[in-house]
Image: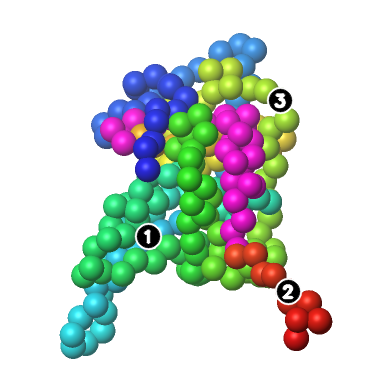
Amino acid sequence: MKILGGVTVTAVLGMLLVIGNSTHVNAQEGKPIVHPAPASQVITVTVTDIYQKKHGKDAEVVIAQAAGFPNDTCDVITTFDVIKKYEERQTWSNIKQRVDIVVNGTPYPAKFRDIGFYPLGLNLACIDFESPYLHTELKIPVLSLDQKAFGPASLSYDDKDIAKSNPGTPFLNKQGEISAVLTATQNGQLEFASAEDIRAFLRVAAGVAPWPTLNRRSLTAI
């Protein structure tokens, strides 16, 4: 699946995780300040390789993980680069793979919703629980999207917050709404998708049913 470049930010952001030396950027006047969501509001998506052995217990290795956040349309929205690892290895005959949504340390079987085309080149993915009932049973709070049309260029971030945040982490405004989501590109640079970008993504994801459509047989056909 082709992943296009997303919303551009400065090259400094892309180097933060590599050099490990973050700097503080003072908020520019007039720009809304956003900070990463608390850990209690962020869940994790993992991709696990399962190596089947002839004798003994199968070996499991987590090959990718990213932060994510719940939504009404998708059980979890995360960054696509974690799912790209899954796609790359789908045809490998010597391993099986598993996608999990990890909530409070407990992994739950999940699946990637293949919407076919990702709008605006956004590096976002829609993940659903394998069970259609888990989202309700776990009572996961849904974070609302920022209602104002702010783009990443209109928002102010603290570089220290960015350096310690994982791709997929939502950045919240002072009302607790998601104003932007941190994503990663193929070359390792960090980018932000705005709340408006996320809405565009969700409009496409909403058009793809996460579950097979069940057609009831009429009584006359029985």
- Is any atom of residue 102 visible in this view? no
Question: CA separation, marks 1 and 2?
Answer: 35 Å
Q: Which residues are magenta?
A: 186-211
Sort mark 1 into few (<14), some (14-19) or many (20+) by Cα contacts within 10 Å.
many
The label number, if any, that marks residue 148 in the structure image: 3
Residue annotated with mark 2:
216
Residue 170, relative to residue 88: is it above or below? above
Q: Which residue is at 66% across, 59% downward?
A: 140
Q: Which residue extends farthest left?
A: 54
Residue annotated with mark 1:
47
* x and y percentages locating residue 114 in the rendered image: 48, 51
- Whether residue 199 appears in magenta in the rendering, the answer is yes
Q: Which residue is at 51% across, 26% downward?
A: 157
Compare marks 1 and 2 and give the one earlier in the sequence: 1
**Tag 2: amino acid:** Arg
Compare marks 1 and 3 and give the one earlier in the sequence: 1
Secondary structure beneath label 2: loop
* x and y percentages locating residue 32 in the rendered image: 63, 22
Q: Which residue extends farthest right?
A: 219
**Tag 3: amino acid:** Lys
Residue 161 relative to residue 58: left or right = right
- Whether residue 142 appears in magenta in the rendering, the answer is no
Q: Which residue is at 43% across, 44% downward?
A: 80
Sort mark 2 into few (<14), some (14-19) or many (20+) by Cα contacts within 10 Å.
few
Question: CA separation, marks 3 and 2?
Answer: 43 Å
